[in-house]
Image (cartoon, helix red, strand yellow):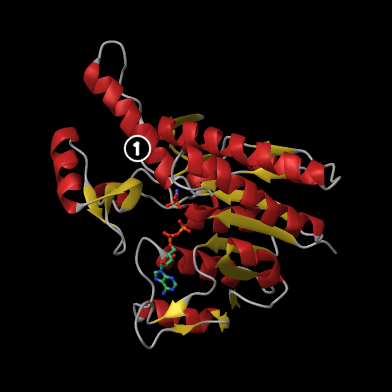
Amino acid sequence: MMERVVVALGGNALGSNLHEQMTAVKTTSKAIADLIEAGYEVILSHGNGPQAGMIRLAMDELNQNDPDKYPVVPLSVCVAMSQSYIGYDLQNALREELLNRNIIQPVATVATQVVVDPIDPAFEHPTKPIGRFMSQTEAEKLAAEKGIQVAEDAGRGYRQVVASPKPKEIIEVDTIKALINAKQTVIACGGGGIPVIKQGAHHLKGADAVIDKDYCSALLADIVDADLLVILTAVEKVALNFGKPDQKELGTVSVAEMKQYAAAGHFAAGSMLPKVEAGIQFAASKPGRKTLITLLEKAKDGLAGKTGTTIQG
Ligand SMILES: Nc1ncnc2c1ncn2[C@@H]1O[C@H](COP(=O)(O)OP(=O)(O)O)[C@@H](O)[C@H]1O
Ligand SMILES: NC(=O)OP(=O)(O)O
């Protein structure tokens, strides 16, 4: 039987600006088309930190220069814009790659709303880095000028930080399932989904946040009953003592073991930790489910059990 795989694309699959993204999606599409050609049923999700930050900054700039003409654009709308912008580039490149291989399979992006809890403590403590990397001096200057919060991002520089509540429910779940059942390749939950809060009987109000795409991908993988969650990032394997002389790369690891490593502080908050936590969540949710964390270029080999870090129940 065909294995169903939710693939979460990280920053290196998309680049961090318009030009990089145009180039990156071509390589990404080849890796994804390889999986489709190998017989996997693929559902795609992706990050949006650099893109949502870029859109937010541009919108803020317009508003500060001429507030009458350009009202404040909420972060939820910036996330919606980023989903469409990234979805467009991905579906364009993947469509072409599949047609070049004579694979007739439509690709569609679903604007996906994801419910968050209005009293999630994350709203009080912004931790999600978005936008470009800056020096400490530049970041502090921007924070003072624009009234935003900034923080150091996993040893890589300073970035704007925003609230990142946990994803609770995917609103467009039936649309996503209908497209999968119609044999279409779906891009959903981009950027962790457009964060919304339930109000009254049926109203959904946009929330000022960016949801983590790894946590949301684990939720998506669960609701579409995927066999595998594949988190593609910039390292081939997850490591213990990362970046230290005694670094040790992990192959296949049980949920229980991975929980111990996470508790011992081996995975950096804001970079590897959410991937490991999302991976554990999915692998532990039902017997037989697995999570693979590896490089984009190694996705096919990883699924064949040749490389990457696999978390299993
Ligand atoms: N223990 C670890 N093992 C491997 N990589 C780690 C570890 N801790 C932190 N990292 C870093 O996490 C990065 C992946 O996180 P990030 O760049 O935020 O992900 P994304 O691919 O979703 O954009 C890796 O490229 C690596 O630099
Ligand atoms: N939304 C999100 O998790 O984006 P990044 O993967 O770019 O951080």
Q: Can residue 193 be seen in this view?
A: no
Residue found at x 81% / y 41% = 99
Image side of residue 177 versus residue 63, left or right: right
Q: Where is residue 75 in the image (x, y as percent from the top left)?
A: 37, 34
Q: Where is residue 148 in the image (x, y as percent from the top left)?
A: 21, 40
Q: Position of residue 308 (x, y in %)?
A: 59, 74
The amino acid type of the residue labelled 1 equals Asp
Q: Position of residue 166 (x, y in %)?
A: 42, 53
Residue found farthest to the bottom? 246
Q: Which of 56 and 95 is in front in this view?
A: 95
Local secondary structure at mark 1: loop
Classify 221 as above or below 180: below
Image side of residue 208 versus residue 141, left or right: right
- Which corner quadrant of the figure contains ligand 1? bottom left
Residue found at x 39% / y 78% = 242
Residue found at x 67% / y 41% = 93
Q: Nearer the viewer, residue 216 or 149?
A: 149
Per the image, the residue denoted by label 1 is 208
Classify 7 as above or below 308: above
Screen quadrant of the C terminus: bottom right
Q: Can residue 246 be seen in this view?
A: yes
Q: Which quarter of the figure has residue 226?
A: bottom right
Classify 135 as above or below 172: below
Q: Nearer the viewer, residue 167 or 301?
A: 301
Image side of residue 179 versus residue 190, left or right: right
